[in-house]
């Protein structure tokens, strides 16, 4: 029954978001799409926080997803948003699978600083890789949606918002199912007492490694959606301030509610333009 309730709530949430995007002005649609993209990355940090870890390097996977989608569009001619986001998720997952065994044994400030250092290494490499645009980055054109190309830019913004809402709802449901599963509950146990969990026969390293890969995949999805929303990618996707923003969102929302992550992301994106307009020199 809980699964059916979650599914019904997800369908209702998607319908509400689609109607809201249709009625809202174009600036809110663009803002909402970017908020969902960043919220997905922050949701990955929430998965880590449930196990007692905080990553200050999620910009690595955010950047990987963005560049994977961007290069697929520019070099391979792939223009469908679903395929591009899937490639972004795949890039994040592959990178996470490579890095997870190296970092799963670290805790506290050591884990945080190592992820931060990795992110800054990626930032430095991208700045010097002129085939990927260097510090200027790359521009992307508007994608299609399952073969459909909106005739107007405003229609394209709404279509991307609906697509981002669909991806967000699916990711939120999957994360909620994971959090309530045995593996998800083991994360909370690892956060409280790792030694006791090891005595019960579970591997804390494995639990943290799985959470890290999940966070990496969500980071890749968020990066691909951000790239499609902004129409531009650059090395700042991997900069430490970008990763810090995701950590701020995760701390603001807490590690209990999935919905709170996206509420926090929308609130932050609403505050940003109005604060820049009202206090431009502050």
Image (spheres, rainbow, N blue to C red):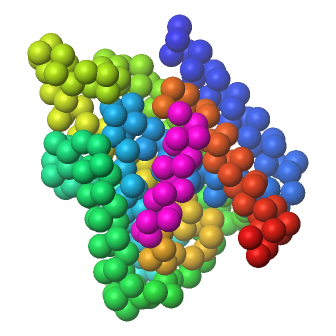
Which residue occupies 55% across, 15% down?
A: 4
Query: Of all residues shown, which one is farthest toward the front?
Result: 282
Residue 95, how many percent across, how many down? 27, 58
Q: Looking at the picture, tell me which residue is in the foreground, 255 or 158.
A: 255
Q: Which quadrant: the C terminus?
A: bottom right
The answer to whether 59 appears left or right of 79 in the picture is left
Quadrant in the rendering for residue 156: bottom right
151 left or right, relative to 73 = right
Residue at 37 percent of width and 91 percent of height = 130
Q: x, y (%) of residue 254?
A: 53, 33
Seen from the viewer's position, the closer of residues 264 and 80 is: 264
Q: In this view, does 238 lie to the left or right of 246?
A: left
Membership of 93 in magenta stretch: no
Q: Is residue 240 above or below residue 52?
A: below
Residue plotted at (69% across, 32% down): 13
Most frequent secondary structure within the magenta stretch:
helix
In the image, residue 81 above or below residue 135: above
Q: What stretch is highlighted in magenta?
A: 238-254
Q: Is residue 236 visible?
A: yes
* Membership of 244 in magenta stretch: yes
Asked if one can make out residue 187 in the rendered structure from this viewpoint, the answer is no
Check the image and name the residue furthest to the top: 1
Q: Position of residue 246 (x, y in %)?
A: 51, 52
Residue 24 position (above or below residue 74): above
Q: How many labels does the image show?
A: 0
Residue at 42 percent across and 88 percent down: it is 134
Task: Answer with the quarter of the image where residue 50 lies.
Answer: top left
Vertical arrangement, residue 25 with respect to residue 206, above or below: below
Task: Residue 240 in the image: state x and y as whole percent.
Answer: 44, 66
């Amino acid at each position: 029954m809980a699964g059916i309730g979650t599914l019904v709530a997800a369908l209702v949430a998607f319908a509400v978001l689609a109607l809201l995007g249709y009625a809202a002005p174009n600036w809110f649609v663009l803002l909402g799409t970017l908020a969902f993209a960043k919220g997905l990355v922050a949701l990955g940090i929430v998965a880590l926080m449930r196990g007692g870890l905080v990553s200050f390097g999620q910009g690595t996977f955010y950047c990987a997803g963005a560049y994977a989608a961007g290069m697929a569009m520019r070099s391979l001619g792939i223009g469908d948003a679903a395929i591009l986001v899937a490639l972004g998720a795949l890039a994040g997952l592959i990178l996470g699978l490579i890095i997870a065994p190296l970092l799963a044994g670290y805790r506290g400030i050591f884990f945080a600083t190592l992820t931060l250092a990795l992110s800054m290494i990626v930032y430095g490499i991208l700045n010097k890789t002129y085939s990927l645009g260097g510090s200027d980055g790359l521009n992307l054109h508007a994608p299609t949606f399952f073969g459909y190309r909106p005739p107007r830019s405003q229609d394209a913004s709404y279509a991307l918002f609906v697509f981002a809402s669909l991806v967000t709802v699916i990711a939120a449901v999957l994360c909620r199912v994971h959090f309530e599963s045995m593996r998800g509950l083991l994360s909370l146990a690892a956060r409280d007492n790792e030694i006791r969990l090891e005595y019960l026969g579970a591997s804390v390293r494995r639990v943290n490694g799985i959470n890290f890969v999940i966070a990496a995949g969500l980071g890749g999805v968020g990066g691909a959606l951000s790239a499609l929303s902004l129409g531009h990618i650059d090395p700042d996707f991997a900069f430490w301030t970008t990763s810090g923003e995701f950590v701020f969102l995760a701390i603001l929302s807490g590690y209990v509610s999935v919905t709170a992550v996206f509420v926090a992301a929308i609130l932050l994106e609403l505050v940003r333009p109005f604060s820049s307009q009202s206090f431009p020199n502050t």
